[in-house]
Amino acid sequence: MQIYLPIAEVSVNAFLLLGLGGIVGILSGMFGVGGGFLITPLLFFIGIPPAVAVATSANQIVASSFSGLLAHLKRKTVDLRMGLVLLVGGLVGAGLGVIVFNYLRSLGQVDLLVRLCYVVFLGIIGALMFVESLRALQRARRAGGVIPAKRKHRGWVTALPLKMRFRTSGLYISVIPPGLVGFAVGLLAAIMGVGGGFIMVPAMIYILHMPTKVVIGTSLFQIIFVAAFTTLLHATTNQTVDMALALFLLVGGVIGAQFGTRIGVKMKAEQLRILLAILVLAVCGKLALELLLQPSELYSIANPGGN
Amino acid sequence: MRRLLALLALLWLPIPVEAQPSVVEEDVVLGLSQSRVRITTNFDGSEILIFGAIRREAPTPDSELDVIIAVAGPSTPVVVRKKARRWGIWINTEAAEIRSAPSLYAVASSKPLSEILSEQTDTIYRITAPRAVWTLGSEKEFAEAVLRIRRDQGLYTRNESSVEVAEQTLFRTSVSMPANLTEGAYRTRVFLLRNQQVVSDFETVIDVQKVGLERFLFNLSREQSLIYGLLSLAIAIAAGWGASAAFRILNRG
């Protein structure tokens, strides 16, 4: 069944869109990532114009994250207080990110910088998570299946003022680190056109030392607002949000997210992390190859104004 | 079956488009299977049958008659970027703006173009795709890139020997419009040639428009972009909540 998309102005198969949305939804529910870093390149691949792909995936992320969040709220695995602190930082970061983005676009190199951002951040985060989860798995095996207690050394994070109690996460830390994490994620999210979950999740685990189960729900909570903000911004400034495209992606996505959440609950935290690490590294590798290998077509067409 | 045939016959009925009066001896009377392409939600490309007859007062000349049909989508300026290797990675280094390039360009002819169209005639009438992409001489490689990319995307096509000419008076061909069609007026030109010279030409317009829901969403996104954005978010939230609620009910039952 072919569907003509009114804003993207291309005709695509509806089941293909539902499938794409579904896969990304499953990942979203499992890992607490919005899936923007996956769905945006996938949309490029099926022939959606890049500007429309970026804006529309933000809209689809809102839906799948909301669906996932509701499932997590029911399990009480969302630290709302932490989410709000992250969100405040995130919105400030996103606002600044949009200004940076427009400046880079005026230089004509935004495409390259977005790609470089992806490769660098996905590479670092993927590698770190992979090594760390592998070690954790080995430790767990040596200890006879018992996961060792949390490390007590929290370093500089505990030394800062403005302490606040985050009961759901079992933390008593300063609001400055979560605020800064939120800010950095918001900044990158606006530049890279994603929700930022793949940066947020490792940051919460490794910098804030939040329990993995709480991390996912809290990340989804923050992503919804950042993605909604991005969607509105794209819709009003570039008019590149395709409602029909978003509808098919999100119908697949919300169903996928429900399954993903169920799969995520059944799996061990280390296994979950190692899978996310592999996924992140795979996307990173593909983008890096595109930068390093000679493209078959050296020229590309871009319409002035970005539409 | 007979009813189906009758319906088909009706569909093929020409929409007559009168040729403008001119001084040439041979005139084109053109018919289109549809003069308007309506982009609906399930639009998946369209085939347009272009056919016509040649009206002449004098007896048929001895030389052979050739027909070229060119359909051009709306022209817009485009920016073309060129990648080069810098510090080990491939980045955009050069850019040029092509002043005008049609979104689609389909040429159909009764014989291979090299046999029936001279370089000079092509320059005057701007018949083939390279003549339709307007640029400065210094940006030739960028214009060629536009031609190459759009040809690979199936937007610029050349169908040689696809126009059937019968008895030097009747001709027909079909032009396929791809699924990724943009809106606008598609300029359709018919050229009659003898001895590589254009003896008559005729022009009409195929109107490509979004209709129904497509039209509504497109207009809303342009005119009421804030409402459009909020509506998109509302749909997203509703879908997310709906799926969650549906699964809760499924789990209970």
Image: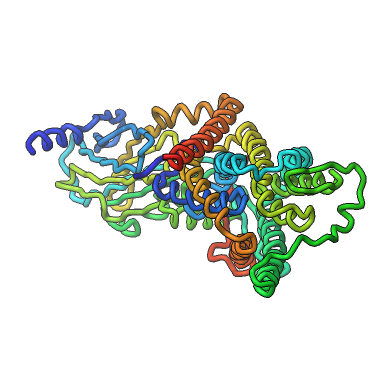
Is there any visible trace of residue A168 in the rendered image?
yes
Using the image, determine if residue A31 lies above or below residue A75.
Answer: below
- With A138 as the anchor, is B184 left or right in this view? left
Q: Quadrant of residue A218?
A: top right
- With B156 as the anchor, is B135 left or right in this view? right
- Residue B82 position, x and y percent, is 62, 58
Name the residue located 20 percent from the left edge and 38 percent from the top edge: B53
**Front one among A192 and B63:** A192
- With A238 as the anchor, is A98 left or right in this view? right
Q: Quadrant of the C terminus of chain A?
A: top right
Q: Quadrant of residue A114?
A: bottom right
- Residue A35 position, x and y percent, is 58, 50
Name the residue located 17 percent from the left edge and 32 percent from the top edge: B10
- Residue B208 position, x and y percent, is 39, 34
**Front one among A294 and A251:** A251
Q: Quadrant of the N terminus of chain A?
A: top left
Task: Name, please, the residue furthest toward the left.
Answer: B2
Name the residue located 26 percent from the left edge and 41 percent from the top edge: B49
* Count of marks, rendered view: 0
Task: Name, please, the residue furthest toward the bottom.
Answer: A142
Name the residue located 62 percent from the left edge and 50 percent from the top edge: A32
Q: How is the image coloured?
A: rainbow
Is there any visible trace of residue A41 in the rendered image?
no
- Residue A51 position, x and y percent, is 58, 44
